[in-house]
C-alpha cells in the first residue's frame, strides 16, 4: 500500500509474533502494548487503594466518555458507560414504547444481543418483531441491499428499528442516514448496535440521529472486554436506568453524604451507567485505545482497511471467492463466499498455520486491522491455497 493518505502497518504497537496472522478483529481485537500498560497500572492502583482518591471515581469516567463521544460526534454528557452491547440494548428496550400490534424491525441473522431484548419487548407489549430477510434484501451481483429492504419494511406500524451499521457475519452494509430519516418520518425510534463498526467506520450521531447507539469496546475500538459505551439522544435522557446504584445520583461526589438519598440523577446519559462503572483497570485501557484511534483518525483507519480488503478480494477472486460489491459492504469487513462452499477443514488448517479468521454462515469472515501487514496477507493466501489444493 503506497497511498500516502493510508496508514502503514501499526504492528509494532502490538505484541504480535511474526508467525501469527490475526485477521479476526470481528471476533476480538488484540490489545496495544500501551493499552496493556494502562490496564496493568490500573490493577496496581487497586492493589494499593490508598492511591485511589474519590475524584478518581469520576474524572476518568468523564474523560473516557468524552473520548468515545468524539468517535461518534457526541458530547460526553450523551454517553453512558455500559458493560456490553446487550446491556445498552436492554436500556433502550426498557425506555422505548411499543403499542400492541406495532413492529420492531431487525435484520435476519442479526447478532443475538440486538435481538433477544426485542423479542421479549414484543412479547410483553403485544407487538411483534419484523425480521427483514436476506431474500427481501437480495440485490444484483450477490449484493445484500439491506437499506432498500429496510426502507420498504419501515412504515406506519414501526415502533423501533434496531439494526447495526454492518452485519456481523459478512459486513453487509446499512445506510444509517437513510434509515434514520425513514424512522423519523414514521415516528419510529432508531436503536443501533455499532459493535462491529464503531472505530473502524465513520459514524456521526448528528447525521444519523439515533435514539440509542451502543458499542462494545473489545473489537474495533481495540479496547478491553466487558466495557462499552451507549450514546443516548438528549430527548431520551429522562428515562429509567436498569440499575439504581449510588454513583449515578446527583451529588454522588460527596462520599460523606451518600445516605442523603437523592431522587435526582447526574445530568445527561449518566443515569444509565452500569454499577461500578469507574472500573480502575478497564477504563484507562479504553481511554488509551480510544486516544490512539482518534490520533489515527477513524476516516483514515477506514480507508486503510478498505484498501487492504480490496487487495484481498482481488486476489481471492483468483481462487474462486466472491465478496459483496463494494457499495454494499463495510470497507473494514469481508465475507468471502466460495461457489463450492467453505471446506469444513478450513479453519483448522488455517489455525495450524497460525492464520486466524472466522467462518460465519457460508462466508469466511476476514477482518484485518492496522496490526496486519502484507506478510499476514501472504500467509493467509498460502494457507487458503493449501486448503483448496
Ligand atoms: C454485532 C455484535 N454486537 C455485539 C456483540 C457482543 O455483544 P455483547 O457485548 O452483548 O456480548 C458482538 C460480538 O460478536 C457482535 O458481533
Image (spheres, grey):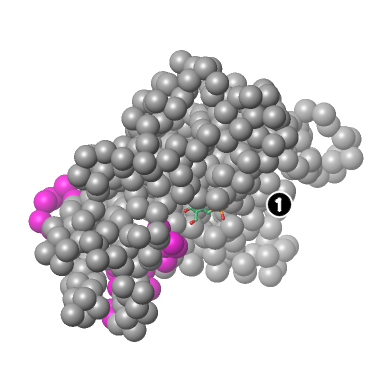
Report x, y in % for residue 344.
36, 74
Residue placed at 46% from the left, 49% from the top? 109
Report x, y in % for residue 220.
41, 53
Give the magenta range. Answer: 1-30
Whether residue 18 can be seen here:
yes
Residue linked to disc 1: 276
Q: Main secondary structure of the magenta part?
A: loop
Q: Nearer the viewer, residue 123 or 193?
A: 123
Alpha-carbon neighbours of circle 1 within 10 Å: few (<14), some, or many (≥20)? some
Screen quadrant of the N terminus: bottom left
Residue placed at 38% from the left, 66% from the top? 358
| Vertical side of 55 occupied by 180: above or below | above
Residue placed at 37% from the left, 32% from the top? 149
248 relative position to 160: left or right: right
The residue at label 1 has a CB less than 8 Å from ligand 1: no
| Vertical side of 183 occupied by 251: above or below | below
The quadrant in which residue 261 appears is top right
The quadrant in which residue 251 appears is top right
Report x, y in % for residue 171.
34, 49
Q: Is residue 27 magenta?
A: yes
Residue placed at 34% from the left, 84% from the top? 352
Report x, y in % for residue 128.
61, 33
Q: Nearer the viewer, residue 261 or 208?
A: 208
Q: Is residue 104 magenta?
A: no
55 relative position to 317: left or right: right
Amino acid at each position: 500500500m503506497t497511498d500516502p493518505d493510508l496508514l502503514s502497518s501499526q504492528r509494532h504497537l502490538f505484541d504480535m509474533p511474526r508467525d501469527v496472522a490475526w485477521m479476526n478483529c470481528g471476533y476480538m481485537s488484540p490489545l496495544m502494548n500501551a493499552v496493556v500498560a494502562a490496564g496493568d497500572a490500573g490493577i496496581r492502583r487497586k492493589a494499593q487503594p490508598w492511591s485511589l482518591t474519590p475524584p478518581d471515581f469520576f474524572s476518568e469516567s468523564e474523560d473516557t466518555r468524552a473520548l468515545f463521544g468524539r468517535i461518534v460526534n457526541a458530547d460526553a454528557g450523551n454517553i453512558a458507560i455500559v458493560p456490553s452491547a446487550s446491556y445498552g440494548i436492554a436500556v433502550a428496550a426498557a425506555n422505548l414504547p411499543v403499542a400492541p400490534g406495532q413492529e420492531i424491525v431487525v435484520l435476519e441473522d442479526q447478532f443475538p444481543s440486538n435481538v433477544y431484548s426485542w423479542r421479549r419487548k414484543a412479547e410483553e407489549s403485544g407487538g411483534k418483531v419484523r425480521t427483514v430477510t436476506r431474500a427481501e434484501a437480495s440485490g444484483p451481483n450477490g449484493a445484500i441491499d439491506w437499506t432498500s429492504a429496510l426502507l420498504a419494511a419501515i412504515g406506519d406500524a414501526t415502533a423501533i428499528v434496531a439494526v447495526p451499521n454492518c452485519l456481523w457475519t459478512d459486513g453487509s452494509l446499512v445506510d444509517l442516514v437513510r434509515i434514520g430519516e425513514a424512522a423519523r418520518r414514521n415516528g419510529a425510534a432508531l436503536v443501533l448496535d455499532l459493535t462491529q463498526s464503531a472505530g473502524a467506520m465513520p459514524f456521526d450521531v448528528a447525521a444519523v440521529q439515533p435514539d440509542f447507539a451502543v458499542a462494545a469496546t473489545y473489537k474495533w475500538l481495540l479496547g478491553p472486554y466487558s466495557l462499552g459505551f451507549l450514546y443516548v439522544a438528549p430527548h431520551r435522557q429522562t428515562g429509567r436506568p436498569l440499575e439504581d446504584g449510588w454513583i449515578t445520583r446527583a451529588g454522588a461526589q460527596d462520599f460523606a453524604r451518600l445516605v442523603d438519598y437523592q431522587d435526582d440523577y447526574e445530568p445527561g446519559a449518566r443515569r444509565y451507567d452500569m454499577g461500578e462503572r469507574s472500573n480502575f483497570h478497564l477504563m484507562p485501557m479504553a481511554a488509551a485505545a480510544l486516544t490512539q484511534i482518534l490520533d489515527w483518525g477513524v476516516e483514515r483507519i477506514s480507508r486503510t482497511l478498505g484498501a487492504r480488503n480490496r487487495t484481498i478480494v482481488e486476489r481471492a477472486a483468483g481462487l474462486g471467492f466472491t465478496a459483496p460489491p463494494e457499495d454494499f459492504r463495510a470497507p473494514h469487513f469481508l465475507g468471502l463466499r466460495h461457489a463450492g462452499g467453505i471446506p469444513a477443514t478450513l479453519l483448522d488448517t488455517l489455525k495450524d498455520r497460525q492464520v486466524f479468521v472466522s467462518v460465519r454462515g457460508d462466508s469466511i469472515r476476514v477482518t484485518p486491522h492496522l496490526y496486519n501487514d502484507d506478510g499476514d496477507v501472504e500467509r493467509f493466501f498460502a494457507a487458503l491455497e493449501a486448503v483448496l489444493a
